[in-house]
Amino acid sequence: METPINSKRAILHICTLETIRPLRDRVLTLSGFHVDSTLSHTEGLSMFWARHYDLVLIDVEGETGIPAAERMCSEIKTAQPEQLVAFVCNWRVAIMTDCPDEILRTEFDPAAFAQGVRDIVPPSA
């Protein structure tokens, strides 16, 4: 497994919405994180096995996205129980799932989004 090259905390971001993914990636990058991202849960799992991530951030787009996000979360947590996994979702989805370590509520507030991730991922040593 590849380790981060610099001291930035690494995030794997899985988001199936092509318009939102680059925006959230940019917010996280500007907030000091190293971000790898993909539109695909399958590719996200391949990326996860290839290197260490401080956080796996899975966007859950509505109730229909819950099963795929929970499958990915379950596979990751079964293999590496200590891995931090968080879902980015709305309040309704948040009450329908219990797989991830954290729920980051979606808001149209980039600063709140970045702060939510900072609150989840411990600072680099």
Image (tube, rainbow, N blue to C red):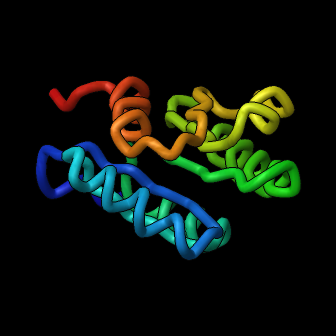
The correct choice, above or below, for 105 with respect to 47 in the image is above
Front-most of 38 and 45? 38
* Relative to 33, residue 47 above or below: below
Tally the numbered discs: 0
Q: 115 or 110, which is in the foreground?
A: 110
| Left or right of residue 98: residue 2 | left
Q: Position of residue 87 (x, y in %)?
A: 62, 41
> Image quarter for residue 16?
bottom right
Q: Residue 32, position in %: x, y? A: 19, 46
Q: Is 69 on the left or on the right of 83, as rendered?
A: right
Q: Residue shown at 23%/27% (left/top)?
A: 123
Horizontal side of residue 47 vs 15, given as left or right = left
The residue under the point 80% across, 56% down is 65
Question: Residue at image x 42%, y 69%?
Answer: 22
Q: Nearer the viewer, residue 32 or 122?
A: 32
Residue 23 at x, y percent in the picture: 41, 63
Q: In the picture shown, does residue 9 fall above or below 102?
A: below
Figure quadrant of the C terminus? top left
> Is residue 117 left or right of 46 when viewed as pictured?
left
Q: Is residue 38 visible?
A: yes
Q: Position of residue 97 (x, y in %)?
A: 81, 33
Q: Residue at x 26, y 48 (%)?
A: 33
Q: Residue furthest front?
A: 108
Q: Quadrant of the N terminus?
A: bottom left
